[in-house]
């Protein structure tokens, strides 16, 4: 599937939502209907709707359909689990990949604990520098069990999504828990991102799990501090008394 087609279809649907063709809470036409309307495959339209879901424009309800959301769509909403390519594309930049390295490595302690394997046991690792219009903006390392994705599977991804690769093996990521830490670029990270030592980074450590709670992916992403803006919907306080700060 061509990424340009997926984003073109998403752009069209996004514009129709913004124009009020479908109101918040309203069910959109089915994927087959939308695909026939644009004379594209259902898989292409499904990929476009997935982008809108990641951006917060729509939500899917199993067995019911796709609905326009009531809340505003937020760019890089931390409440949504999205891939780095989607994040880069949302800024209007062309995502790319450099310096890929896929291999079996001894599991670091934190990775072993998350994946439920022994520390030092071989796990599959993929390290990539993700680019926006050719600029190095994120240094990403992903780890998973070798029985889920072998190093050769990761090597074949190129700029592709590791979420899609897991899904192709029957491992659908349902949710992830991320920890965000500001830090300064040092050593190999600074070299891979081609920035001076001390450059501000935002590091995101995340564990992704299936719907039944099984961890299938551990990731560490070093983002250039000036490359992205993240947003977050904060609920409340509603009727609860506000705490003193």
Image: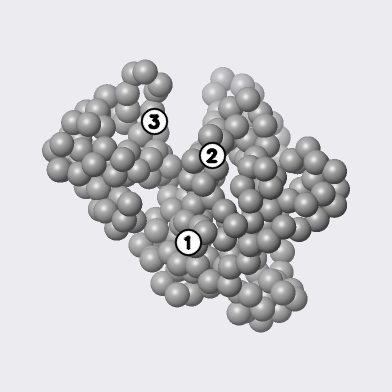
Which residue, given by chain and number where applicable, does mark 1 sit on? Answer: 159
Which part of the image, by quadrant, shows the C terminus? top right
Which residue, given by chain and number where applicable, does mark 2 sit on? Answer: 169
Does residue 70 appear to the left or right of 81 in the view shown?
Answer: left
Indicate the secondary structure of the residue bearing disc 1.
loop
In the rendered image, residue 227, in percent from the top left (x then y), is placed at: 51, 66
Q: 56 or 193: which is nearer to us?
A: 193
Indicate the secondary structure of the residue bearing disc 3.
strand
In the rendered image, residue 241, in percent from the top left (x then y), is placed at: 64, 24
Indicate the quadrant where residue 191 lies: bottom right
Q: Are marks 1 and 3 in contact (CB under 8 Å)?
A: no
Q: Is residue 137 in sight in this rendering?
A: no
Does label 2 or label 1 sit earlier along the sequence? 1
Residue beneath the point at 63% across and 51% down: 150
Placement of 16 over or under 66, stated as above or below: below
Between circles 1 and 3, the one closer to the viewer is: 1
Coloring scheme used: one colour
Placement of 21 over or under 122, stated as above or below: above
């Amino acid at each position: 599937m061509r990424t340009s087609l997926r984003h073109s279809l998403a752009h069209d649907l996004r514009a129709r939502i913004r124009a009020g063709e479908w109101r918040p809470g309203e069910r959109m036409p089915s994927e087959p209907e939308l695909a026939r309307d644009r004379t594209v495959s259902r898989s292409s339209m499904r990929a476009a709707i997935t982008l809108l879901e990641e951006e917060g424009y729509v939500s899917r309800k199993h067995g019911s359909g796709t609905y326009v959301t009531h809340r505003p769509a937020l760019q890089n909403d931390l409440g949504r689990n999205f891939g780095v390519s989607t994040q880069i594309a949302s800024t209007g930049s062309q995502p790319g990949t450099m310096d890929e390295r896929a291999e079996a490595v001894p599991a670091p302690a934190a990775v072993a604990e998350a994946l439920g394997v022994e520390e030092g046991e071989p796990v599959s690792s993929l390290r990539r520098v993700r680019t926006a219009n050719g600029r190095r903006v994120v240094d990403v390392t992903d780890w998973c069990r070798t029985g889920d994705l072998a190093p050769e599977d990761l090597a074949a991804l190129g700029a592709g999504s590791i979420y899609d690769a897991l899904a192709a093996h029957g491992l659908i990521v349902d949710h992830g828990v991320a920890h965000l830490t500001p830090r300064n670029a040092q050593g190999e990270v600074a070299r891979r991102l081609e920035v001076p030592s001390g450059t501000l980074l935002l590091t995101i450590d995340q564990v992704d799990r299936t719907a039944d709670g099984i961890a299938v992916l551990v990731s560490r992403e070093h983002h250039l501090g000036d490359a992205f803006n993240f947003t977050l919907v904060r609920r409340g306080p509603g009727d609860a008394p506000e705490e003193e700060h």
